[in-house]
Amino acid sequence: MLTKLMEPLLKRTSEYGKVTYELLRLKIVDKASDLTSTLFSKFLLFSCMLVFAFFVNIGVSLWLGKLLGANYYGFGVVALFYGLVGIVLYLTRSRIKAKFYNFLIRKFLNTPNEHETNH
């Protein structure tokens, strides 16, 4: 008699476990897809901006070189500028890492950032 009562309960528990597993799997796939597509689109945008910046830098270097009397002076000034930018980025690397880390966590957990909650 007890086994007749337990059998439907065990069957429902097993089905519940399977459905819960499937739901968790689908949520993970959704989050991973969202994160991957976001990072990929940002990578494409960054790549386009990088090519644009490359050609602008060559133009600025040649223009400065013409003003300073030799092309290598222009390229030297631009290189010095990027050296200073690199130093600033190096000194603020922990803040940059924290912002990127927080972005990934917010994206994965689907929580708004502080700018979205203030509006």
Image (cartoon, rainbow, N blue to C red):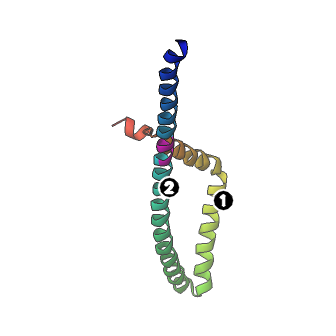
- In the rendering, at what x and y percent does residue 111 appear? 44, 38
Q: Nearer the viewer, residue 25 or 69?
A: 25
What is the magenta range?
25-29
Amino acid at circle 2: Thr
Q: Residue shown at 46%/69% (left/top)?
A: 49
Tell me the SS state at disc 1.
Answer: helix
- In the rendering, at what x and y percent does residue 46 appear? 49, 65
Amino acid at circle 1: Ile
What secondary structure is the stretch in magenta mostly built from? helix
Q: Which residue is mark 1?
A: 87
Q: Nearer the viewer, residue 111 or 37?
A: 37
Q: Is residue 30 above or below residue 11?
A: below
Q: Nearer the viewer, residue 80 or 89?
A: 89
Tell me the SS state at disc 2.
Answer: helix
Separation of disc 1 and disc 2 at Cα?
A: 30 Å
Q: Which residue is mark 2?
A: 36
Q: Residue shown at 52%/12% (left/top)?
A: 1
- Comes first in the chain, label 1 or label 2: 2
Residue 41 lies in the magenta stretch: no
Q: Is residue 75 above or below residue 119?
A: below
Q: Residue shown at 46%/74% (left/top)?
A: 52
Residue 26 lies in the magenta stretch: yes
Q: Is residue 45 above or below residue 10?
A: below
Q: Nearer the viewer, residue 10 or 48?
A: 10
